[in-house]
Amino acid sequence: MPEQIFEYAPAPESRAVVSLRSCYEPYIDGEFAPAKSGEYLTTVNPADEEPLAEVAVSGEADVDRAVAAARRAFDTVWSAMPGAERGKYLFRIARILQERSRELAVLETLDNGKPVKETRDSDLPLAAAHFFYHAGWADKLPYAGLGPEPRPLGVAAQVIPWNFPLLMLAWKIAPALATGNTVVLKPAETTPLSAMLFAEICQEAELPRGVVNIVPGAGETGRALVGHPGADKVAFTGSTEVGREIARAVAGTGKRLTLELGGKGANIVYDDAALDQAVEGIVTGIFFNQGHVCCAGSRLLVQESIAEELLPRLKARIERLRLGDPLDKNTDIGAINSAAQLGRIRDLAGTGTEEGATAWSPACELPERGYWFPPTVFTGVSQAHRIAREEIFGPVLSVLTFRTPDEAVTKANNTPYGLSAGVWTEKGSRMLWTAERLRAGVVWSNTFNKLDPASPFGGYKESGYGREGGRHGLEAYLG
Ligand code: NAD
Ligand code: MG
């Protein structure tokens, strides 16, 4: 560890702003009613493995009730309501998210393990912005370029992952409601709590019953939901493997489908890039949210002539990242979300060393309890290595080099995925030349991991299909 001039005193956010119930039931037709399944799972805080609450595992009968409630709400209230009226509910939800943002940020940090700095400054503001943005669309749909009278599809079955629990909920629910659809959403099994609190927010906003239903549970609940004959539209974010299974289950049913799956984003740094800014962008690209980011810049492609200059600067920066208590406002790197995910990261990172790459991590102490993995950089990586091909979904960066722009593009596109990429250069022409050739849904230039509700997000190839956000995202919910 290099000498630090300042030591940081602990700055913990208060847990007292969150009051947890001991048990959460499915939210169906405007009420929390005991799960018919009678089954419960425990969600834990991954930073210390302490149990937070019991959460129902919704079974087929629960999913059935939720889909029926959503259908009723669609037929009797929501689809016929003027857009301007629907918009008011979305504005109301957005404002409540802002009002309760501190509580939600702490809750999200407790359940997920991500630093409160990120839940406070990214997850919550972005979730609220998503509702504000779509509230604005609700009465303007005839002007979205999708025909003079676009119609909602009906009941949307939505399944989301654990990496941005509330934000992914917002990405799913806000466009569905703005376009006049009703929703049954299943949060991830390790991070259901912010969705359960969102259900309370729907009550607080006096959203008509049945418009939003939340059915917590694991893979089986998700399977029952996406396979339910009463769903008109399926929206999934998660692994490519489960995405494939869902695509097979939905094929031939007439249901509309959008899939937002994994990625192996390339972050390309040209020799003329502003190096210190690039270093910040590389760090944000792979260490934001512990690398649990589908659009992470997990492959650094650096021009050979500057590699020797860039890598020491990158390492010096990584040595200053603070890993530890996610509730501490100074923490940069929090806990890995689950024991299972930690196992996957360890296994894949292990293959890096076995296959001949060189691993480097800063000297950093990992807390004794909880699930932790140090920020890791692999050099000497070849395109054939598993760590260059497979999504690790953790704080692990693979560094490759290139000599010419052609080689950079060829290497960046040499992946089964196609979700995101970054290009670092001071030259506009080079940036545009590169961006035009990258097969990625989002290309950032001289920045990384910037998200905005007005900007469509989605992938090519095994990263899925369909777009979320922007005018393009509305299309997925209109017929
Ligand atoms: P996953 O795909 O298994 O889980 C995502 C969601 O799908 C969860 O809500 C889960 O309960 C649900 N689910 C699981 N099986 C299902 C099924 N058969 N039908 C319907 N829903 C189902 O992801 P995971 O196991 O939590 O993570 C595994 C890997 O997936 C990660 O290592 C990462 O590479 C990738 N991942 C990507 C994203 C992303 O944002 N693109 C998010 C999470 C995970
Ligand atoms: Mg949890």
Image: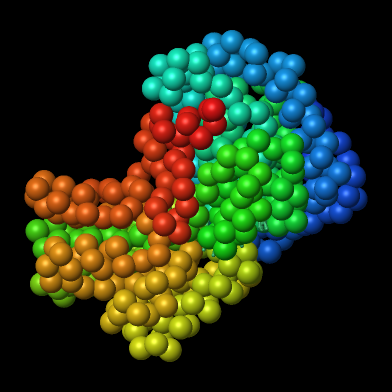
Where is residue 267 drawn, in percent x and y? 28, 60
Q: Residue at x 64, y 18 (%)?
A: 79
Where is residue 438 drawn, in percent x and y? 26, 55
Q: How is the image coloured?
A: rainbow
Q: Residue at x 59, y 33 (%)?
A: 173
On screen, 160 above or below 180? below
Where is residue 170 drawn, in percent x and y? 55, 36
Quadrant where the N terminus sits is bottom left
Q: Residue at x 57, y 63 (%)?
A: 241
The quarter of the rendering in which ligand 1 is drawn is bottom right
Q: Can residue 141 be seen? A: yes
On screen, 393 above or below 93? below
Q: Quadrant of residue 205?
A: top right
Q: Residue at x 46, y 34 (%)?
A: 473
Residue situated furthest front in the rendering: 252
Drawn side of residue 284 relative to residue 274, left or right? right
Q: Quadrant of residue 96?
A: top right
